[in-house]
Structure formats: structure tokens, C-alpha cells
Amino acid sequence: MLELNFNQRKIEIDLPNGVYNLGSLSGTGKTYLCKAFKYLGSHGYPVRGYDYEDYLDDKSLKSYINNDNVKYIFIDRYDLYTNEFLDDIQELGKNCAVLIDIKRLHVLDIDTLDAEIYLTNNKVVVYSTDSRI
């Protein structure tokens, strides 16, 4: 389990390697978690965040993440650039947990596992809801 602190919230996440779809519900903390991962990753923690701004800046997901010590990667608003970087996402999912936020119900061209986020005033918990794990 990885436990981090960001803006007075504790983040708890314990997922095996793989690619996870976090679903389409709004207000669950997905964008918050991506921002936390971007900040914490830039300060040496084993997490990374990738968002639409990175995509518009032509940052390649694989080169942006290029770190063997990363345990969790969060891809925010993937519905805005659906099915880009699919090979990279699948490759990264072999070595870490890749969490994907898709606001609309898009069908991905890759197999994903299901996970959810539980957000409170002082905690964010990411957990699997997939029966295959």
C-alpha cells in the first residue's frame, strides 16, 4: 500500500499492476488525484500525473513517465484524447498501476480493470472493484 499526504489529505492506494478504468462519475476526486500525483511525482514520490494540458503540449506519455520507479500513473480526462498512447499505456500497465479517468462512457480498445475513488475532507482512497483481482 502507498500512503501519501497532499493538501492535508491522506491518499491511500493499493492496486496491483494493470490498467484501471475509474469510471465516469464526476466529483469523485479524479482530477484532484491527478494534480496530487503531478505535484508529488515532481518531488520524488513514485507517482505521476498526465492530463489534457500535457497532451496539448505534445508530451509523449511514455517519455513523460520515463521512470522505472513509478508505481502509479494517473491519466486525467482521457475522454478528450481517447485511444492515444494505447501501446504505451498497456506497456506501462505491466510495471505499474495506470489509472484512467474517462468522463464519458467511451469504450477503450484495451482491456481494463475497474477501480473507484472514495473522497472525503481528509482522505482519498483508491480501491479495486474488479472481481478479477
Image (tube, rainbow, N blue to C red):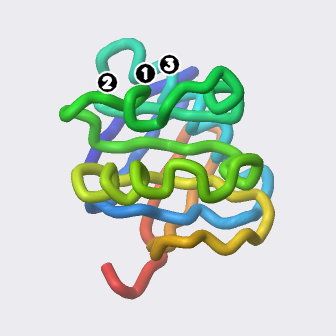
Q: Where in the figure is residue 11, as x and y percent of width and height?
A: 45, 39
Q: Are marks 2 and 3 in contact (CB under 8 Å)?
A: no
Residue at the far bottom in the pictured view: 131
Q: Nearer the viewer, residue 6 or 47?
A: 47
Q: Is residue 14 visible?
A: no
Q: Nearer the viewer, residue 63 or 27?
A: 63
Pointer 1 or 2: first along the chain:
1
Q: CA distance from mark 1 to mark 3?
A: 4 Å
What residue sits right under mark 3 in the picture? Answer: 39
Q: Amino acid at mark 2?
A: Tyr
Quadrant holding the C terminus: bottom left
Q: Is residue 83 above or below residue 58?
A: below
Q: Where in the figure is residue 46, as x and y percent of width and height?
A: 29, 31
Q: Amino acid at mark 3?
A: Tyr
Q: Are marks 1 and 3 in contact (CB under 8 Å)?
A: yes
Q: Amino acid at mark 1?
A: Leu
User: Viewed as shown, does residue 45 lie left or right of 99?
Assistant: left
Pointer 2 or 3: first along the chain:
3
User: Viewed as shown, does residue 79 lie left or right of 128?
Assistant: right
Q: Is residue 70 visible?
A: yes
Q: Residues within 10 Å of mark 1 (few under 14, many from 20)?
A: some
Question: Circle 1 — which element?
Answer: helix
The quadrant where residue 35 appears: top right
What residue sits right under mark 1 in the picture? Answer: 40
Residue drawn at 43 percent across, 21 percent down? 40
What residue sits right under mark 2 in the picture? Answer: 45
Residue drawn at 47 percent across, 63 percent down? 20
Q: Where in the figure is residue 21, as x and y percent of width and height?
A: 55, 65
Residue drawn at 76 percent across, 48 percent down? 80
